[in-house]
Amino acid sequence: KENNLPVLIAIFPRFDLSKPYAHKPIHRKISNLAKSHGLLSFDLLPSFDQHGIAKLRQDFVHPNEEGHEVAARAIHKHLNKTVEFNCK
């Protein structure tokens, strides 16, 4: 806050492949907590679902290399839409 830098909490899905996805309430809780502290949050679940979550997992909690790439692209796109950067 002192330096007026945005903080983004990226919410990664668990990769347990449950149907329906069982952890959405936790995602909402994290998002609400971030908001209550004046922080931005971004849920990566839709991006992972769009690309096929099963092929993006290393294990139940970690994305593989392709999953990291999907996350990076989604976060980059989200930041460009929502944050104004004043780099000097």
Image: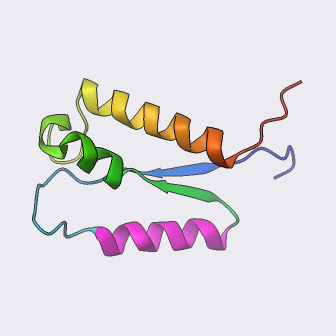
Q: Is the C terminus in the top left, top right, bottom left or bottom right quadrant?
A: top right
Report the residue at 87% width, 49% height from top: 2
Was residue 44 drawn as part of the magenta stretch in this picture? no
Report the residue at 32% width, 54% height from top: 45
Estimate the x, y position of residue 73 in percent, counting from the top left: 45, 32
Q: Examine the rendered structure and indicate whether residue 34 appears above or below residue 63.
A: below
The tally of labels here is 0
Report the residue at 33% width, 53% height from top: 46
Observer-nearest residue: 83 or 4? 83
Q: Examine the rendered structure and indicate whether residue 48 appears above or below residue 25.
A: above
Task: Give the extent of the magenta segment.
Answer: 24-37
- Of helix, strand and loop, which mostly describes the magenta segment? helix
Estimate the x, y position of residue 19 in percent, counting from the top left: 10, 66
Colour scheme employed for the rendering of this structure: rainbow
Observer-nearest residue: 8 or 44? 44
Determine whether, in the image, residue 44 is placed left or right of residue 4. Answer: left
Report the residue at 83% width, 27% height from top: 87
Toward which corner of the image does residue 70 lie, by quadrant?
top left
Estimate the x, y position of residue 74 in percent, counting from the top left: 45, 39
Estimate the x, y position of residue 66 in percent, counting from the top left: 26, 26
Determine whether, in the image, residue 88 is placed left or right of residue 58. Answer: right
Was residue 30 drawn as part of the magenta stretch in this picture? yes
